[in-house]
């Protein structure tokens, strides 16, 4: 159901044919990179945070990690991930399939600066065995409830 919902959403942007499904899990950055034959940094991992009781998504490059000081400076609270068993209800996708497409109404989506260095990136597409191939401007355009670019990742510039 998750990938079909994402395909329907991406069809609005002419991008449904970019969704790829795999036989094996692509839930982790390493698994997704192996399935796609790309470097792990190009995997757009979508992280789900709880901000004052409300869900929020941030897509970060696969080699980036959340910098707690940067996160707190931007969002004025400590980074708190949404629990895996709450993801479907709060953001619309299960663990491993969380993506910035076809999300629950009102969930803001941010893209991290760590993605800008790439032409092509691969976020998940609603399940733990899927991905979608996009150029960064397509990702920005298609991200539901796109709320802007942020700089909250560390480790990717090293």
Image: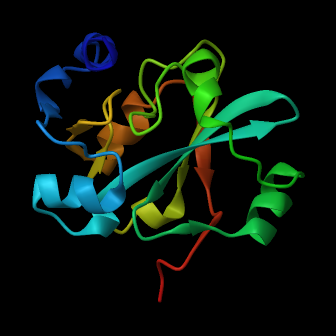
**Residue 119: percent from left, percent from top:** 24, 59
**Residue 40: percent from left, percent from top:** 29, 66
Tell me which residue sits at (66%, 17%) in the image. Answer: 106
Give whichever of 144, 62 is nearer the camera: 62
Tell me which residue sits at (69%, 45%) in the image. Answer: 81
**Can the viewer see residue 140?**
yes
Quadrant showing the N terminus: top left
Q: As drawn, is 69 to the left or to the right of 55?
A: right
Q: As drawn, is 71 to the left or to the right of 132?
A: right
User: Image quarter for residue 55?
Assistant: top right
Tell me which residue sits at (29%, 63%) in the image. Answer: 30
Rendered view: 84 above or below 86: below
Tell me which residue sits at (10%, 61%) in the image. Answer: 37
Q: As drawn, is 140 to the left or to the right of 112?
A: left
Residue farthest bottom in this picture: 158
**Can the viewer see residue 118?**
no
**Residue 152: percent from left, percent from top:** 65, 63
Rendered view: 152 above or below 98: below
**Residue 46: percent from left, percent from top:** 48, 44
User: Image quarter for residue 91?
Assistant: top right
Q: How is the image coloured?
A: rainbow
């Amino acid at each position: 159901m998750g990938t079909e919902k994402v395909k329907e959403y991406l069809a609005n942007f002419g991008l449904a044919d970019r969704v790829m499904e795999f036989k094996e899990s692509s839930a982790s950055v390493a698994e997704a990179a192996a399935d796609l034959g790309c470097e792990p940094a190009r995997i757009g991992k979508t992280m789900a945070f709880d901000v004052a009781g409300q869900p929020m998504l941030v897509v970060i490059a696969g080699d980036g990690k959340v910098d707690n000081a940067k996160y707190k400076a931007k969002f004025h609270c400590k980074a708190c991930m949404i629990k895996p068993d709450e993801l479907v209800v709060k953001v619309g996708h299960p663990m491993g399939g969380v993506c910035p497409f076809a999300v629950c109404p009102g969930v803001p989506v941010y893209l991290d600066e760590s993605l800008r260095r790439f032409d092509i990136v691969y976020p998940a597409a609603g399940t733990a065995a899927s991905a979608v191939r996009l150029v960064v401007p397509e990702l920005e355009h298609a991200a539901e409830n796109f709320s802007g670019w942020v700089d909250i990742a560390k480790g990717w510039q090293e």
